[in-house]
Structure formats: structure tokens, C-alpha cells
Amino acid sequence: MLNTALLLASLTFVRAAPTIDPASSIAGSTVSFSFPPAGATFTAYEAYFPDASEVGYPGPTPTGDEAEAIQTAPVAALNLDAYPLVNPLAQYTGDVPSFNPLHHWGNLGPWYSVGDAFGLPDASPQIPAGCELTQVHLIHRHGARYPTSGSDPGQFAAFVHSAAEGAGFTATGPLKFLNSWTYKLGAEILTPFGREQLYELGVGFRVKYGELLKGFNALPVWRTTSEERMVDSALQFAAGFFGVQQYQTSYYEEIIVNNSGFNSTLSPSNACLNSNNAVGNLGGVYSGNWTDIYLNGTVERLQQYVTGLELNTNYVFGMQQLCAYEIVALGYSDFCDIFTVEEWLGFEYANDLIFWYSNGPGSPVAAAQGIGYVQELVSRLTQTPLTVFDTSTNETLDSNPITFPLNQPIYVDATYDTVIAQIVTALNFTTLAANGPLPVDHIPGYQTYHVNQIAPFGSNLVGQVVSCPASPQNATQESFIRFILNDGVVPLTGIAHCETPNPDGLCSVANFVQGMQERIAQVNFNYDCFADYPAPYPDDIIDGREWK
């Protein structure tokens, strides 16, 4: 008995290593769902469910007065939430406890109120004291959407699925979720959260600017482009602004074709040949180089958790994009757990480079693509019909007072992230370009151009026209204009005749129009968009145009 005890005591017990299951063969596969169910048609039982107009008995329906919170409220209502998205903030603590990844996804994050990001710390979206709102011009981006067809997220999914169906792979640690992960994203249309964004933007705009409806003597004409996400965004905005039972008969939605051969200031790339060649893709080149720099160590760090998949910087960049796209589509993403603060800052800067050099101040074709909207804005401000059509303006639509009215108190246009970036470049908001050109091998210490502040999902640029005393010494009323980008007031000091700093970002309409007319003359649309010139390298452009 003693010998048995000694023998047992001398044995070394080794715990078996946990079994690591390889990835499922469905990993990376595309999963989709359509509703209503097949065979379920609305007309089948429509007669059993009459609409409200047929049922009657609506109860009391007196309307209240219009709101004008942008004028009457003591402080601005700000957009600081992204419900119902699960914010990955809790995963980022330590040295940067207030770091919010949602604000570092460039054009792939939801819009938020940027505060004094543009350099006017004492300014507010609220109408300045002593001034009265008379007109508003809104141009907004569509809401959150699924990725572009064939882009990095889908390519990463195909890469994963190919490995899963082939030799197989095994992921562990923070990448273990890849073993059963499937690609649940559609392509290019709005996500449910994207629909919410535009509905809420419409509600907010009614609360802020509804009083201006009293200045209409006909139904408003608002504009969008023909892509499905653009039409849906415009309709969601209108439903929020007018109400779901009223919007279809409360205004006209002008849907402008977005396709080759059609001019539109809301999709100007179709009218600008160089925007679709190497000259227009400088941002992709510079961003790709930067991605190789900031993600080099990340590839090595993540590779240790997966066998059978050979990662590279392109795939890891796609994984960062998947975090953003899955959050705004599905509400949560496992991809968000695997990146550090520094890696998110690198991702943010990669998107800044794309926009700076392809659609912003560093692009030789950006101002040319945005200048058509500037021409329309001047036409609306001066109530002067356009007579020269030498940019992306649409002569058929813009020369017709029915489709391009000049007497509206409220203008609303829906467009894309790239176009908003091009328009703010054409408007010559030079404070955004103050530290340009952007370096392509490191993040600068003082950076003024951030795409997450300029063109995120739901981005909105508001031109407020107000009547104010001409000066403290002159009570005569004069018209002024200023611009609010995602609730941040933008200085207009880079515009000719608006150089005098104003704490509220105001410039007289007369001076602004004169400055814009000079800017229009300065931008050579035909040369920048159609001349045969090489892509500039190094690129030291800071005003969005090639021709000087």
C-alpha cells in the first residue's frame, strides 16, 4: 500500500490542452434577409385594413404654432448620442479615458455636434443676439449605409470564406469570433440607423426652423439624387419634418439622375472627367501608403491569433472598416474589440488623407466639383436666375423656376460625403485647411482637417441668413450669412470681402456674394476637370484647384 502511495506521489500530472476547434465552413459567408416573407403581399388583405382617411374619427386635430428654437431657445440642442448603437467607449480606458471610437471613423461614423472645432469658441448655432433669422440653406449627407459593392469589408469576408472552404483556419483569443463570423452587410442602401438619422434630422430642423414655413406661398421644392439611399434619406427627412401622414403632399421632391451623362451639383463627378482617373484618386494612393505604416505592427500582433489566414494591412484596414459598418448596420461589432486607441487614430487619419487629397483642399478637382453648388447658392441668395451653365449645373432644371425656385425661405438638398467635402472646399473655408498639406507619413501635431467633423453619416451644412444691425453704431438692418457645419460655426475669413473676423462667423450677404462671384471666376472648371495634366506629386495644393 505504501509503495502504491509513493508511486502516485511521484507521477507528474499534465492537464490536457483545451481543444481549439477550427473555423466553421460558413465563416465569412454572406448572409442576407428580405422582408416581407415570400408570398406575403400587402394587397392580399388590404381591404381588411383601411387607412386612417377611410376609418375616420381622427379626434381633435388643431395645430400649434411653428417652432423656432434656433432663435428663441437660450442654448442650442446638440447631437451627442447615437442610440441604439452600442458605443465601444467602455473598451477604451487607461491613458485616454474619454476616447470615443465613434468619433474617429472619418466618413464612416455618425454625425455629432462638433462644438468649437472650427475655431470660434464663443459662437453658437443659435441665432446671434439682436439678429433675426430670415432664410436657411441646408445641404446634408445621406444617413448611415452599407458598404460600397466590392469594397474592403466584402473583400475581407471573401478572403475568410475562401480559407474556411479550403484548407481551413483557426482563430483564437480576440479573433476567436472569426471562426463562426458571417458577413451580414448589404450594399450601399441605408441601414435602419441611417433611416433614423435622417428622420431625426428632419424633426430637428422643423423644431429649429419651422417658423420660416410662414414665408412660403407655394409648396417647397427640395432636391436629392436618384440612388436609393439618397431618395430614402430625403423622404425620411421629409417625414420627420412634415409628419408621416403629411409629407407626401406638403412639398415636392426633385430627384436628379445620378449617372454618367447627367449634370447635377449634388453628384458632380459625372460631369468631371478627371475626378474618375488618377488625378481624382490621389487620396487613395496616399492613404494606402499611410495604412502600410500605421498597421504594420498591427498585422504582426493579430497574426499570432490566427493560423490559416495570412493577414496584411489591406485586410486589417478592412477589419477596421467592418467595425464601423457593422456598428451602424447591426448595432454592435466584435471587430471593435481588437484595436487600440493608436490604431483608431491611424484609421481616422487614413480617412482624412483620402478626403484631403481626393475631395478636399489637396485635390486638384475638388473646388471644380463643388463650384456648381456655389453658383446655385449665389443664384438663390440674389434671386437671380442662372444664365451660364459651364460647370456641373443642370441647365434643364436650373433654368426652370418650377424646378429651381429662387424665393424659398428654406432650401434642402441631399448629397454625398465627397460632395460636402468638395463644397466646403469650393466655399473656401480656409480654416479647415490651415495646416495643409497633410503629411503622408505621420499624423501632424496640430491638425485642422478632420473628415469626422466634415462629412460623417448624416452630416449637415446649414447656411443661416439673418437680419442684424449693420454695426453697434448703426441700427440699420442688414442681411448677413454664416455657415454651421455639424453644429460648429465656420469662420468665413478666407473668403474675399469677409476677411474681417467676426465672433459669430457672420459676413454681410453682399460681401459674401461678391466673394463667391470672385471664387467662381477663380475656379477653372473646364481645365481642372478635363485638361490632360499629371497627378501632382508632391501635392502641395491647399485650395482644391489645379489651374492658377
Image: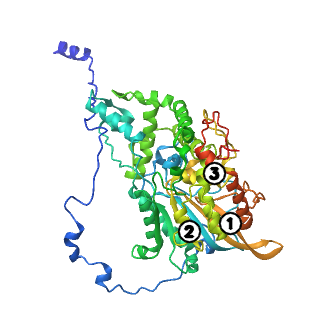
| Residue 271 in view here | yes
Residue type, numbered disc 2 = Tyr
Disc 3: CA contacts within 10 A as few (<14), some (14-19) or many (>=20): many
**Mark 1 or mark 3: whose residue is earlier in sequence:** 3
The secondary structure type at the circle numbered 2 is: strand
Instruction: Measure how far apart labels 1 and 3 are at the Cα level.
Output: 18 Å
Asked whether disc 1 touches disc 2, contact meaning CB atoms under 8 Å apart, the reply is no
Classify 10 Å Cα crowding around label 1: few (below 14), some (14-19), many (20 and above). Answer: many
Q: Nearer the viewer, mark 1 or mark 2?
A: 2
What label does residue 481 carry, if any? Answer: 1
**Horizontal and vertical percent position of residue 472:** 81, 71
Q: Name the residue nearer the viewer: 315 or 497.
A: 497
Tell me, yes or no, whether the two marked residues, 2 and 3, touch with CB atoms within 8 Å: no
Residue at label 2? Answer: 411
Q: Look at the image and tell me in which quarter the C terminus lies.
A: top right
Q: Position of residue 511 (x, y in %)?
A: 74, 64
In the image as oriented, which residue stretches furthest toward the right? 473
467 left or right, relative to 472: left
